[in-house]
């Protein structure tokens, strides 16, 4: 019982140590993935923003999946309000 | 007297500082509010704004701020005896660095996690922001030159460390890809990388063939190579070129590919290094052989030069950039400001403290110390080497062979310095781009143009100051300028904190007193250096140092004038509002 307690404590300390050191790395990877996502969203919304997109019809199918991310995306892109008439998130 | 006493007194002062002074600052001056919604919660995005456990955040903050600088400064400053450096490190940490680090963190938390530069613009105006940018530019330029010199010097004096340091690069890239592509943990791969590095260091300590000794390749000490340079000068020149090419590539890569995984490995080294040195100290209990004071020297007065020789470890403006840049966005609760900010400063103080102990206990007698530290320039050129040997001697206390210990210490210092160099060149590139935008010079806003300017100017600054032995032998002359730029940055952050506290209706004295102290010491030290040592009318004049020193002097004056005018106008203005 005592050994298990010590083992669990040690495990927790190692986990915290790992978390301590890996936080900045995880942040950078999350940022890199978010940048990729942002580019993808730009491609999906490009036609509505005035950039011709031959695959526009197909990207329409993705809207239900990405609409929740739209508000955060336009804020990150420096647009305080939704740039699209069709989507009035704020 | 045993070196253990210095450690124990240092621990006690740090403990009392944290227990009482930081409590007073947090409760009576900052008035930390546990119910305040921190930016990490308010703007939570899973990337920059992430509420983080305070122990984890402290570890992250500490490993970001600690590096090679709190080792080099104290190793030089013991020239005036161990007492002045010791007092400045422990009192500076408690009364200046603790307030500065926790204060910038608090200010940033109360202002949406904004950086000190943005806060300068908000609290004082556009002029202050530009001043801030120029001071950071100066600081990073000094960091690049000084750390490139440190690395080249250690590569020349410890050729057995070179291979380990270079092996770290592919290992870090491999770990970066491993985590990026497979989302794996970094813990085991990084420990494996550390074992490979130290294994290489051990082998290289015993087998000459694994030592990359450029001086030997160029014919050994005293030999002359092309252009009539000595072998040591040529080796230094070649190392600087290699380092600058490397840093150009490293600082233009995405950070997750090389910088971050290497940081992770270095964090292990920092924790391991501190544990080894303090454990070795308590096992070996070495006697202090350096004199308590050596302040009667005629070449460089301890007052005020000590206060710019030891910057990191006593107070460092760079910490404010980390506090307000990343840490403030991850603070879970406002009351954690005390734990993360103040204890982060104490962590760096502990590193500086062990650096002092390692150096002052290394020599067999006081005579040996005095002959090695025979002048300030001798202290500058040999301080780091003495630390490597002294720390190696402490490490032998826990069973590390005497032939291997200095190599491992050199690997640790070079790893810190290389990561700092990479981050610093990257930061310099960003600042050059920002200044390009500010002054409408689009050509320097491009990544490669800005990096080229950063790398070429840093290489030139490393190579130009020359001592009696050609390239590299005068690099230590830049160290006081690095310390001064760091103090200027801390000074402007403390000024911002003082204004911020006044606007909140708190006493500004805990920030204002260290700020006045720092600015006075910086101005006084620069006045002595610039007008009596480096000026064209001085016996050993140096145009490069004179120009840089004069710039630093003008910046320091600018900060003082800004501080006086802002504080006077604050006193006159009855309609001040809390910006928090």
Image (cartoon, coloured by chain):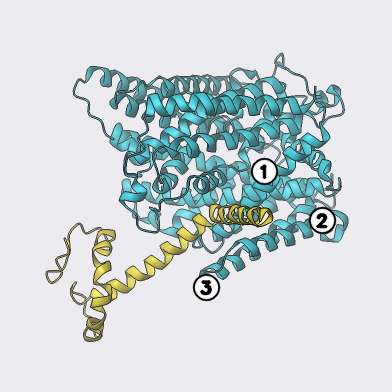
Outermost front residue: A1
Instruction: Relative to B369, say whether B136 is above or below.
Output: below
Q: Which of labels 3 and 2 is toward the front? A: 3
The residue at which mark 1 appears reads as B150
Residue B181's disc is 3
* Residues at marks 1 and 3 on the same chain: yes
Q: Are marks 3 and 2 in contact (CB under 8 Å)?
A: no
Q: Is residue B5 left or right of residue A60?
A: right
The residue at which mark 2 appears reads as B202
The N terminus of chain B lies in quadrant: top right
Outermost left residue: A85
Q: Nearer the viewer, residue B404 or B295?
A: B404
Instruction: Relative to A27, say whether B227 is above or below.
Output: above
Q: Residue at x 32, y 74 (%)?
A: A40
Q: Which of labels 2 and 1 is toward the front? A: 2
Q: Which chain is cyan?
A: B
The C terminus of chain B lies in quadrant: top left
Q: CA distance from mark 3 to mark 2?
A: 32 Å
User: Element at badge 2?
Assistant: helix
Q: Quadrant of residue B107?
A: top left
Number of numbered labels in the structure image = 3
Residue A78 image offset from top left, x and y in percent: 25, 58
Q: Is residue B327 left or right of residue B534?
A: left
Residue B250's disc is none
């Amino acid at each position: 019982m005592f050994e298990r307690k010590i083992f669990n404590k040690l495990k927790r300390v190692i986990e915290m140590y790992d978390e301590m050191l890996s936080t900045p790395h995880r942040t950078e990877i999350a940022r890199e993935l978010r940048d990729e996502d942002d580019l993808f969203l730009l491609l999906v919304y490009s036609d509505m923003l005035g950039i011709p997109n031959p695959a526009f019809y197909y990207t329409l199918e993705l809207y239900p999946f990405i609409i929740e991310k739209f508000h955060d995306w336009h804020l990150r892109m420096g647009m305080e309000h939704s740039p699209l008439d069709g989507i009035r998130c704020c | 007297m045993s070196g253990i006493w210095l450690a124990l007194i240092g621990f006690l002062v740090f403990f009392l500082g944290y227990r009482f002074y930081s409590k007073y600052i947090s409760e009576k001056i900052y008035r930390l509010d546990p119910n305040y919604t921190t930016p990490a919660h308010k703007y939570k995005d899973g990337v920059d704004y992430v509420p983080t456990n305070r122990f984890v955040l402290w570890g992250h903050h500490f490993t970001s701020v600690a590096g090679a600088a709190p080792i080099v400064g104290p190793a030089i400053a013991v020239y005036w005896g161990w007492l002045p450096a010791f007092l400045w490190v422990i009192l500076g940490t408690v009364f200046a660095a603790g307030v500065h680090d926790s204060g910038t963190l608090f200010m940033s938390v109360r202002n949406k996690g904004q950086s000190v530069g943005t806060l300068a613009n908000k609290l004082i105006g556009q002029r202050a922001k530009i001043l801030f940018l120029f001071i950071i530019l100066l600081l990073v330029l000094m960091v690049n030159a000084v750390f490139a010199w440190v690395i080249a010097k250690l590569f020349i004096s410890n050729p057995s460390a070179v291979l380990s340091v270079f092996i770290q690069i592919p290992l870090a890239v491999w770990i970066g890809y491993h985590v990026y592509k497979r989302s794996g943990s970094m813990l085991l791969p990084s420990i494996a990388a550390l074992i490979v590095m130290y294994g290489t260091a051990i082998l290289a300590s015993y087998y000459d063939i694994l030592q990359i000794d450029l001086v030997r390749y160029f014919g050994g000490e005293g030999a002359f190579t092309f252009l009539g340079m000595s072998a040591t000068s040529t080796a230094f020149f070649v190392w600087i070129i290699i380092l600058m090419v490397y840093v150009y590539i490293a600082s233009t890569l995405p950070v997750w590919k090389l910088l971050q995984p290497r940081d992770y490995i270095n964090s292990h080294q920092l924790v391991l290094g501190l544990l080894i040195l303090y454990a070795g100290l308590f096992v070996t209990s070495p006697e202090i052989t350096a004199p308590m004071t050596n302040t009667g020297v005629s070449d460089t007065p301890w007052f005020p030069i000590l206060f710019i020789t030891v910057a990191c470890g006593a107070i460092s403006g760079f910490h404010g950039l980390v506090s307000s840049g990343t840490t403030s966005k991850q603070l879970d609760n406002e009351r954690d400001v005390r734990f993360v900010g103040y204890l982060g400063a104490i962590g760096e103080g502990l590193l500086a403290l062990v650096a002092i102990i390692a150096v002052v206990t290394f020599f067999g007698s006081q005579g040996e110390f005095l002959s090695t530290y025979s002048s300030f320039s001798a202290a500058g050129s040999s301080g780091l080497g003495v630390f490597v040997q002294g720390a190696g001697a402490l490490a032998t206390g826990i069973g590390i062979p005497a032939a291997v210990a200095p190599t491992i210490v050199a690997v640790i210092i070079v790893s810190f310095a290389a990561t700092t160099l990479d981050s610093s060149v990257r930061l310099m590139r960003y600042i050059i781009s920002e200044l390009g935008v500010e002054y409408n010079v689009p050509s320097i806003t491009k990544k490669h143009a800005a990096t080229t300017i950063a790398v070429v100017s840093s290489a030139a600054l490393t190579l130009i100051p020359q001592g009696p032995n050609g390239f590299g032998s005068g690099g230590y002359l830049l160290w006081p300028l690095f310390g001064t730029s760091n103090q200027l940055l801390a000074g402007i952050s403390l000024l911002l904190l003082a204004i911020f506290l006044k606007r909140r209706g708190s006493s500004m004295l805990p920030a204002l007193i260290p700020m006045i102290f720092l600015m006075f010491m910086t101005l006084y030290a620069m006045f002595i250096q610039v007008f009596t040592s480096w000026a064209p009318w001085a016996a050993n004049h140096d145009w490069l140092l004179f120009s840089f020193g004069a710039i630093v002097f003008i910046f320091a004056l600018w900060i003082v004038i800004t501080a006086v005018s802002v504080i006077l106008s604050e006193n006159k203005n009855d309609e001040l509002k809390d910006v928090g």
